[in-house]
Amino acid sequence: MGTAKCGFKILYGPPIMEPRIMFIGFQPGGDERHLRKEDQQGWPPVCEYAVSGWPLAHKLQDIFGVEVLKECVGVNSIFFRAPLWLLTGSWIATFGNA
């Protein structure tokens, strides 16, 4: 991963066989400030979309409700975090259209 130590995120909840909904994202954002020791030691006890306060979690809570989200799981196709500027497209301002 070079000099970037952004970590990784595999599941946004415990592994559930045949979850009610499986949300599949592209790649978790963040940087070293988003590293949490518990992410590297085990699964979250409940789907983070049901209990977290980030904008996507709030939107999903509004759409599906907390109780439904507790029966769901989220995963990303690429587990390694990418810096937020890379995911938001601001890399164009940094590197141009090369």
Image (tube, rainbow, N blue to C red):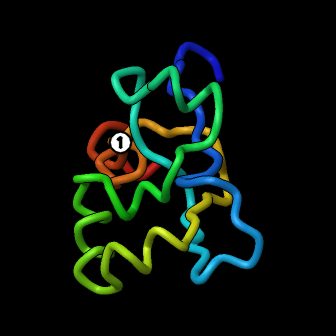
33, 16: nearer the viewer? 16
Whole-percent x, y for residue 9 in the image: 58, 42
What residue do we see at 30% from left, 53% from top? 52
Vertical placement of residue 1 versus 98, above or below: above
Vertical placement of residue 35 versus 93, above or below: above
Whole-percent x, y for residue 78 in the image: 66, 51
Amino acid at the residue labelled 1 = Leu
What residue do we see at 23% from left, 67% from top? 58
11, 5: nearer the viewer? 11
Q: Secondary structure at mark 1?
A: helix
What residue do we see at 39% from left, 37% from top? 30
Whole-percent x, y for residue 83 in the image: 42, 36
Taking the image as shown, residue 25 lies to the left or right of residue 41, namely: left
Taking the image as shown, residue 57 lies to the left or right of residue 22, namely: left
Quarter of the picture containing the N terminus is: top right
Vertical placement of residue 6 versus 26, above or below: above
Taking the image as shown, residue 32 lies to the left or right of residue 13, namely: left
Circle 1 residues within 10 Å: few <14, some 14–19, many ≥20: some
Residue lying farthest to the top in this orientation? 3
Vertical placement of residue 9 versus 20, above or below: above
The part of the image, by quadrant, that contains residue 80 is top right
Whole-percent x, y for residue 16 in the image: 70, 65
Q: How many marks?
A: 1
Label 1 belongs to which residue?
84
